Image (cartoon, rainbow, N blue to C red):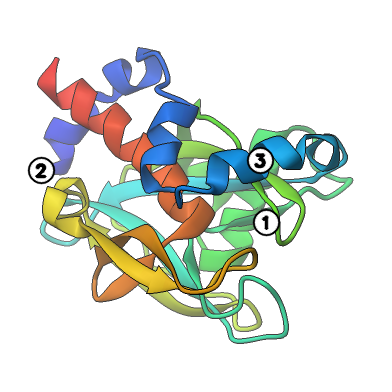
Protein backbone atom coordinates (compact mmCIF):
# COMPACT_ATOMS: atom_id res chain seq x y z
CA UNK A 1 0.00 0.00 0.00
CA UNK A 2 1.24 3.46 -0.91
CA UNK A 3 2.09 5.44 2.23
CA UNK A 4 -0.16 8.38 1.33
CA UNK A 5 -3.08 5.95 1.18
CA UNK A 6 -2.03 4.44 4.50
CA UNK A 7 -2.04 7.87 6.13
CA UNK A 8 -5.63 8.38 4.98
CA UNK A 9 -6.80 5.47 7.15
CA UNK A 10 -4.90 6.60 10.27
CA UNK A 11 -7.97 8.37 11.74
CA UNK A 12 -9.84 5.06 11.52
CA UNK A 13 -6.91 3.16 13.05
CA UNK A 14 -6.89 5.64 15.93
CA UNK A 15 -10.61 5.20 16.69
CA UNK A 16 -11.38 1.55 15.94
CA UNK A 17 -12.44 -0.46 18.97
CA UNK A 18 -9.54 -2.70 19.91
CA UNK A 19 -10.10 -6.39 19.16
CA UNK A 20 -7.92 -7.11 22.19
CA UNK A 21 -7.18 -10.53 23.61
CA UNK A 22 -9.44 -12.28 21.09
CA UNK A 23 -7.16 -11.04 18.33
CA UNK A 24 -4.00 -11.93 20.23
CA UNK A 25 -5.13 -15.49 20.93
CA UNK A 26 -5.36 -16.22 17.20
CA UNK A 27 -1.56 -16.34 17.24
CA UNK A 28 -1.10 -18.04 20.61
CA UNK A 29 -0.52 -21.74 21.34
CA UNK A 30 -3.68 -23.55 22.43
CA UNK A 31 -2.49 -23.77 26.03
CA UNK A 32 -1.74 -20.04 26.33
CA UNK A 33 -5.13 -19.05 27.79
CA UNK A 34 -4.96 -21.67 30.56
CA UNK A 35 -1.35 -20.72 31.24
CA UNK A 36 -2.32 -17.08 31.81
CA UNK A 37 -5.15 -18.05 34.16
CA UNK A 38 -2.68 -20.03 36.26
CA UNK A 39 -0.31 -17.05 36.43
CA UNK A 40 -2.82 -14.38 37.41
CA UNK A 41 -1.09 -13.55 40.72
CA UNK A 42 2.35 -13.40 39.10
CA UNK A 43 1.06 -11.04 36.42
CA UNK A 44 0.11 -8.48 39.09
CA UNK A 45 3.80 -8.05 39.93
CA UNK A 46 5.09 -8.10 36.36
CA UNK A 47 7.69 -5.60 35.20
CA UNK A 48 6.60 -3.06 32.59
CA UNK A 49 7.93 -2.54 29.08
CA UNK A 50 6.74 -0.90 25.88
CA UNK A 51 7.23 -1.51 22.16
CA UNK A 52 6.51 0.34 18.92
CA UNK A 53 4.86 -1.02 15.77
CA UNK A 54 6.42 1.61 13.53
CA UNK A 55 5.26 2.19 9.96
CA UNK A 56 6.97 4.40 7.38
CA UNK A 57 7.40 4.87 3.61
CA UNK A 58 10.28 2.96 2.04
CA UNK A 59 12.20 4.45 -0.89
CA UNK A 60 9.39 3.38 -3.24
CA UNK A 61 6.87 5.10 -0.91
CA UNK A 62 5.33 1.76 0.01
CA UNK A 63 4.14 1.34 3.60
CA UNK A 64 6.64 -0.69 5.61
CA UNK A 65 6.85 -2.05 9.18
CA UNK A 66 10.15 -2.30 11.02
CA UNK A 67 11.01 -5.30 13.19
CA UNK A 68 14.33 -6.27 14.73
CA UNK A 69 16.28 -9.48 15.13
CA UNK A 70 17.74 -9.46 18.61
CA UNK A 71 21.33 -10.42 19.34
CA UNK A 72 22.20 -13.89 20.59
CA UNK A 73 22.69 -13.69 24.35
CA UNK A 74 21.92 -15.58 27.56
CA UNK A 75 18.28 -14.64 27.87
CA UNK A 76 14.76 -15.73 26.99
CA UNK A 77 14.46 -13.45 23.95
CA UNK A 78 17.84 -14.29 22.43
CA UNK A 79 17.91 -14.29 18.62
CA UNK A 80 14.17 -13.64 18.35
CA UNK A 81 12.33 -11.25 16.06
CA UNK A 82 10.41 -8.50 17.81
CA UNK A 83 9.43 -4.86 17.86
CA UNK A 84 11.85 -2.16 18.92
CA UNK A 85 11.19 -1.45 22.58
CA UNK A 86 12.19 -2.34 26.09
CA UNK A 87 11.88 -1.89 29.83
CA UNK A 88 10.53 1.17 31.61
CA UNK A 89 13.24 3.41 33.06
CA UNK A 90 12.70 5.76 36.03
CA UNK A 91 13.34 8.71 33.68
CA UNK A 92 10.31 7.83 31.53
CA UNK A 93 7.37 10.13 32.25
CA UNK A 94 4.86 7.71 30.68
CA UNK A 95 4.76 4.25 29.15
CA UNK A 96 4.53 5.96 25.74
CA UNK A 97 7.78 7.74 26.55
CA UNK A 98 9.35 4.33 27.18
CA UNK A 99 8.32 3.10 23.73
CA UNK A 100 9.69 6.23 22.06
CA UNK A 101 12.98 6.22 23.97
CA UNK A 102 13.63 2.52 23.41
CA UNK A 103 12.79 2.78 19.71
CA UNK A 104 15.26 5.63 19.33
CA UNK A 105 17.95 3.69 21.21
CA UNK A 106 17.48 0.41 19.35
CA UNK A 107 17.00 1.54 15.74
CA UNK A 108 18.41 5.07 15.74
CA UNK A 109 15.21 6.92 14.81
CA UNK A 110 14.66 10.19 16.66
CA UNK A 111 11.71 9.95 19.03
CA UNK A 112 10.69 13.46 17.94
CA UNK A 113 10.09 12.18 14.40
CA UNK A 114 7.63 9.49 15.52
CA UNK A 115 3.92 10.27 15.50
CA UNK A 116 2.17 7.94 17.93
CA UNK A 117 -1.21 6.87 16.54
CA UNK A 118 -2.49 4.90 19.52
CA UNK A 119 -1.82 2.43 22.30
CA UNK A 120 -3.14 -1.09 21.75
CA UNK A 121 -3.70 -4.11 24.01
CA UNK A 122 -0.94 -5.11 26.39
CA UNK A 123 0.26 -8.70 26.69
CA UNK A 124 2.03 -10.68 29.38
CA UNK A 125 5.26 -12.58 28.69
CA UNK A 126 5.68 -15.40 31.25
CA UNK A 127 9.37 -16.31 30.67
CA UNK A 128 10.60 -12.78 31.44
CA UNK A 129 7.68 -11.71 33.69
CA UNK A 130 7.00 -8.57 31.66
CA UNK A 131 3.75 -6.91 30.72
CA UNK A 132 4.33 -5.28 27.34
CA UNK A 133 2.38 -2.24 26.18
CA UNK A 134 2.45 -1.84 22.36
CA UNK A 135 1.94 1.36 20.40
CA UNK A 136 1.31 2.01 16.71
CA UNK A 137 3.36 4.88 15.32
CA UNK A 138 4.44 6.35 11.99
CA UNK A 139 7.34 8.19 10.43
CA UNK A 140 6.55 10.66 7.66
CA UNK A 141 9.85 10.09 5.83
CA UNK A 142 12.03 7.14 4.88
CA UNK A 143 14.36 6.56 7.85
CA UNK A 144 18.03 5.71 7.99
CA UNK A 145 18.23 3.03 10.66
CA UNK A 146 21.16 2.78 13.05
CA UNK A 147 20.85 -0.54 14.94
CA UNK A 148 22.07 -0.56 18.54
CA UNK A 149 25.18 -2.80 18.37
CA UNK A 150 24.66 -4.44 21.76
CA UNK A 151 20.97 -5.28 21.24
CA UNK A 152 20.10 -5.54 17.56
CA UNK A 153 21.51 -8.10 15.14
CA UNK A 154 19.50 -6.95 12.13
CA UNK A 155 16.81 -4.51 11.01
CA UNK A 156 13.91 -6.27 9.26
CA UNK A 157 11.76 -4.15 6.94
CA UNK A 158 8.40 -5.79 6.21
CA UNK A 159 6.04 -4.70 3.44
CA UNK A 160 2.57 -3.92 4.79
CA UNK A 161 1.11 -5.86 1.86
CA UNK A 162 3.09 -8.97 2.82
CA UNK A 163 2.19 -8.55 6.50
CA UNK A 164 -1.55 -8.32 5.77
CA UNK A 165 -1.51 -11.34 3.45
CA UNK A 166 -2.99 -14.55 4.88
CA UNK A 167 0.00 -16.31 3.32
CA UNK A 168 2.15 -14.80 6.08
CA UNK A 169 0.50 -17.00 8.73
CA UNK A 170 1.95 -20.46 9.30
CA UNK A 171 2.22 -23.15 11.98
CA UNK A 172 5.52 -24.45 13.29
CA UNK A 173 6.51 -27.05 15.85
CA UNK A 174 8.53 -25.27 18.51
CA UNK A 175 9.79 -25.79 22.03
CA UNK A 176 8.72 -22.94 24.29
CA UNK A 177 9.46 -22.03 27.89
CA UNK A 178 6.42 -23.99 29.01
CA UNK A 179 6.08 -26.90 26.56
CA UNK A 180 8.13 -29.05 24.22
CA UNK A 181 7.36 -29.79 20.58
CA UNK A 182 4.03 -27.99 20.34
CA UNK A 183 2.33 -26.54 17.28
CA UNK A 184 2.57 -22.77 17.41
CA UNK A 185 0.92 -20.26 15.05
CA UNK A 186 3.42 -17.77 13.67
CA UNK A 187 3.99 -15.08 11.07
CA UNK A 188 6.49 -15.84 8.31
CA UNK A 189 7.91 -12.46 7.33
CA UNK A 190 11.03 -11.84 5.23
CA UNK A 191 12.06 -15.48 5.81
CA UNK A 192 11.84 -15.11 9.59
CA UNK A 193 9.46 -17.01 11.87
CA UNK A 194 7.81 -14.57 14.28
CA UNK A 195 5.95 -16.20 17.15
CA UNK A 196 5.03 -15.76 20.80
CA UNK A 197 4.13 -12.38 22.26
CA UNK A 198 5.32 -10.49 19.17
CA UNK A 199 3.03 -12.57 16.93
CA UNK A 200 0.13 -11.99 19.32
CA UNK A 201 0.63 -8.22 19.23
CA UNK A 202 1.12 -8.30 15.45
CA UNK A 203 -2.20 -10.12 15.17
CA UNK A 204 -4.02 -7.20 16.76
CA UNK A 205 -2.13 -4.70 14.59
CA UNK A 206 -3.13 -6.70 11.52
CA UNK A 207 -6.79 -6.88 12.53
CA UNK A 208 -6.94 -3.14 13.28
CA UNK A 209 -5.41 -2.16 9.93
CA UNK A 210 -7.49 -4.69 7.98
CA UNK A 211 -10.68 -3.34 9.53
CA UNK A 212 -9.64 0.26 8.81
CA UNK A 213 -9.02 -0.63 5.16
CA UNK A 214 -12.33 -2.48 4.73
CA UNK A 215 -14.54 0.15 6.43
Q: Earlier in the sequence, mark 2 or mark 1?
A: 2
Q: CA distance from mark 2 to mark 3?
A: 39 Å
Q: Position of residue 45 (x, y in %)?
A: 88, 40
On the image, numbered disc 3 is attached to which residue?
Answer: 36
Q: Position of residue 96 (x, y in %)?
A: 64, 35
Looking at the rendered image, the disc whose residue lies closer to the viewer, 2 or 1, is: 1
Foreground of the two, 121 or 152: 121
Q: Quadrant where the N terminus lies?
A: top left
On the image, numbered disc 1 is attached to which residue?
Answer: 86
- Tags 2 and 3 touching, CB below 8 Å: no
Residue sitting at x 10%, y 59%: 60
Determine if residue 194 is in view. yes
Q: CA distance from mark 1 to mark 3?
A: 21 Å
Residue sitting at x 21%, y 23%: 211
Q: Is residue 103 left or right of residue 117?
A: right
Q: Is residue 138 left or right of residue 100?
A: left
Q: Is residue 54 above or below residue 191?
A: above
Foreground of the two, 143 or 15: 15
Dividing the picture into quadrants, the one containing residue 16 is top left
Dividing the picture into quadrants, the one containing residue 213 is top left
Q: Earlier in the sequence, mark 1 or mark 3?
A: 3
Q: Is residue 65 above or below residue 33?
A: below
Residue sitting at x 74%, y 60%: 128
The total of numbered circles placed on residues is: 3
Residue sitting at x 36%, y 40%: 26
Q: Position of residue 10 (x, y in %)?
A: 29, 24
Q: Which mark is residue 2?
A: 2
Q: Residues within 10 Å of mark 3 (few under 14, many from 20)?
A: some
Determine if residue 61 is in view. no
Q: CA distance from mark 2 to mark 1?
A: 30 Å
Q: Earlier in the sequence, mark 2 or mark 3?
A: 2
- For label 1, the SS is strand
Amino acid sequence: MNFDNFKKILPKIAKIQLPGVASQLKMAPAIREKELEAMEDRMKNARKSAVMALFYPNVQQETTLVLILRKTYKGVHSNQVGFPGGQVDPEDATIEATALRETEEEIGVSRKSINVVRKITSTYIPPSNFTVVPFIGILEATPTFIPQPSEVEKIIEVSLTDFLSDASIIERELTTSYAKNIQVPAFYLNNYVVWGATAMMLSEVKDIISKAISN
